[in-house]
Amino acid sequence: MHLAIDIATKNVENGGGPFGAVIVKDNEIISQSFNTVTTSNDPTAHAEINAIRKACKAMETFDLSGCEIYSSCEPCPMCLSAIYWARIEKIYFAADRYDASNVGFNDSFIYNELSLPISERKIPIENLMKEEGQEPFELWRKSTIKIEY
Amino acid sequence: MHLAIDIATKNVENGGGPFGAVIVKDNEIISQSFNTVTTSNDPTAHAEINAIRKACKAMETFDLSGCEIYSSCEPCPMCLSAIYWARIEKIYFAADRYDASNVGFNDSFIYNELSLPISERKIPIENLMKEEGQEPFELWRKSTIKIEY
């Protein structure tokens, strides 16, 4: 966690966002990264997402079972969900979503939005062509070449 | 939406996941993409995330204000949060999280997890060094070179 916080601090010194993350497996560091949203023009490039992508690249897999993640701040809902998709098995964080909100990041707001029914959310969301939307799933169900995850 | 569903179908035919997304601004397609989790070893490479990354690259910005997204399936919490971070202004989807669960994807499960208190979630999550975790935020607050987002 010391390292994750150091990475976050260093990133601010370099003009990036105040977030760092480290992924560990069997007491060995697999990847470490920081927030590059503004420096790489990528709103998904949070520290945890970057660290997950680097770890997967290093290990040539999309499955980080057996890994743990240390994040300088509580993962936002995007990063938390990515951690679930990546099957990371334990999460440590230092600052929390309210600390992040206090310095201008929307983590806490997005957590609230996700818990609301679709009709009450701030970004309007509309269901179209539900019937036709089943087609790719039908094909997936029957596919003999699919790789499940 | 026809295009998003077609992209999803074609991706299954090519061995990828059954998801497609299209980002539009002023009636013009800015980016389109499909799920590449297994083909690129990246658990974050959902159709919507890929489409956001491509749109940001094309427009050289991390802010997709004024854009709308068409997704063949209701965005999972990772993608929905990414849509918030990217400031996309409207979301259309065809199949929903329950349809996705029916063919083996965890969208609905992750939505449930996010709504639970930390102590009741399946992946254990622990708060460490909360005090030290404020350091990067303190530095961010005082930084004169930061780019806010």
Image: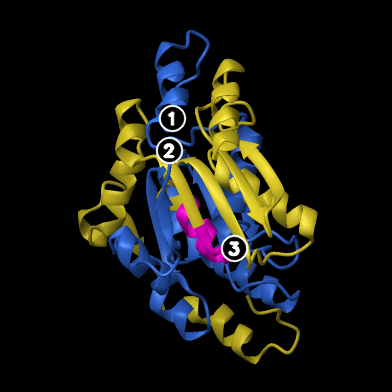
Chain colours: A blue, B yellow
| Amino acid type at image mark 1 | Glu
- Relative to B91, say whether A149 is above or below: above
- Image quarter (top left, top right, bottom left or bottom right) of the C terminus of chain B: bottom right
Task: Tell me if label 1 and label 3 are in contact, CB under 8 Å.
Answer: no
Q: How crowded is mark 1: few (under 14 residues within 10 Å), some or many (20 or more)?
A: some
Using the image, name the chain to which the residue with label 3 belongs. Answer: B
Residue sitting nearer the eye, B47 or A66: B47
Q: Is residue B83 magenta?
A: yes
Location of residue B130 in the rendering, given as x and y in whole percent from the top left corner = 41, 76
Q: Distance between the Cα atoms at labels 1 and 3?
A: 27 Å
Q: Quadrant of residue B66?
A: bottom right
At a point 29% along the width and 62% down the height, the residue shown is A115
What is the chief secondary structure element of the magenta stretch?
helix
Q: Are marks 3 and 2 on the same chain?
A: no
Q: Quadrant of residue A16?
A: bottom right
Q: Give the range drawn in magenta.
A: B79-90
Residue sitting nearer the eye, B52 or A128: A128
| Amino acid type at image mark 2 | Met
Which residue is most to the left? B120
Using the image, name the chain to which the residue with label 2 belongs. Answer: A
Q: Distance between the Cα atoms at labels 3 and 2?
A: 25 Å
Q: Is residue B130 left or right of residue A51?
A: left
- Tell me the tag on residue A129: 2
At a point 43% along the width and 32% down the height, the residue shown is A133
Between marks 1 and 3 in the image, the one whose residue lies nearer the viewer = 1
Q: Distance between the Cα atoms at labels 2 and 1?
A: 5 Å
